[in-house]
Image (tube, grey):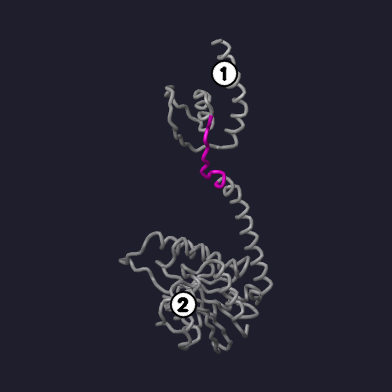
Amino acid sequence: VSDLRIILLGKNSSEISRVGNFILGREAFDTEAPPPSVEQRSERAGGMVEGRYITIINTPHLFHPQLYLNTLDKRVIECMSLCSPGPHVLMLVLQPDDFTETDRHRLNHILHCLSEDPHKHTLVVTTQQLQSDSCVDPAKENVSQRIITEYTNTYVEFSRGCSRSDLVEMVVKMVVENGGSHLKWKEFKDAQVAIKQRQHEQTAQKEPERKISERSERLNLVVCGSDGSVKSSISDLILGQIEYSAESRSVCVRRDAEVCLQSEIEELKKTIPNLEENKHQTSIGKG
């Protein structure tokens, strides 16, 4: 393979820039740059390495927490356009205390934006060794370890004296195992279609919950009439609770409860005729 295209991914902008510079053998990316912002764009650099021309796309901003998914998708498209006709390898630069569970979900979103089968093209590179006396958040360490385990066949420890030749050789090996193929625009577009389909399915699953939520909005009802016992009975049915005080009141009374409205209405329709019948019988008895 005479021409290689690599997309660098990771949270630590200085570390991913350092890996990019290491591969190219020059200071192509600024390792002392300030933390990435949502306005930042991907950077491209290239050069001859080990007899091959390697193009690297540096993406220090894709894991910014304020980069919302619709904007994130646009940034991923920019990455693809910078390495047209498509990258051979997605290189994830990872540290033991780097990723939270939220970051892992974002990583999966990015990878599946680029390919329906990202494992074939993803190489995980760790740039730090975990020292025995270091204090690392166990939750973050667990997430990073899960990612490493998931990509165990395409994982290299950059921190253990890995040379440029070793790293390039591993990239070439991955490309050869993939038949020399790279992520193509068509595959990228298919992945986008798949993502939209998944989002549509998730929206469809949430639709019943949304309707239930709409039905759960507060309703204010006023029960009017001259017969206090009938009004109390109707209120009991609607609210699904019984008010034990039987004394007559000359003032308005407020009662609240959370109810499944449709079922209560159906029950009310059945019960009101019985209430009217009982009231009529009581009137006859008094007469």
279 up-or-down from 262: above or below: above
Q: Nearer the viewer, mark 1 or mark 2?
A: 1
Identity, as a three-letter code, of the amino acid under mark 2: Ile
List the residue tagged with mark 2: 16
For the residue pair 260 and 12, the one nearer the viewer reads as 260
Give the residue at x 56% y 10%: 287
Q: Which image quarter: residue 172?
A: bottom right
List the residue tagged with mark 1: 279
As for residue 90 lying within the magenta part, the answer is no
Magenta part of the chain: 213-224
Identity, as a three-letter code, of the amino acid under mark 1: Lys
Q: Secondary structure at mark 2?
A: helix
For the residue pair 155 and 280, the one nearer the viewer reads as 280
As for residue 221 lying within the magenta part, the answer is yes
Mark 1 or 2 closer to N-term? Answer: 2
201 up-or-down from 34: above or below: above
Give the residue at x 57% y 44%: 215
Give the residue at x 47% y 68%: 66
Q: Is residue 197 left or right of residue 75?
A: right
Pointer 2 local density, CA inside 10 Å: few below 14, some 14–19, many at least 20: many
Q: Is residue 120 left or right of residue 136?
A: right
Pointer 1 local density, CA inside 10 Å: few below 14, some 14–19, many at least 20: some
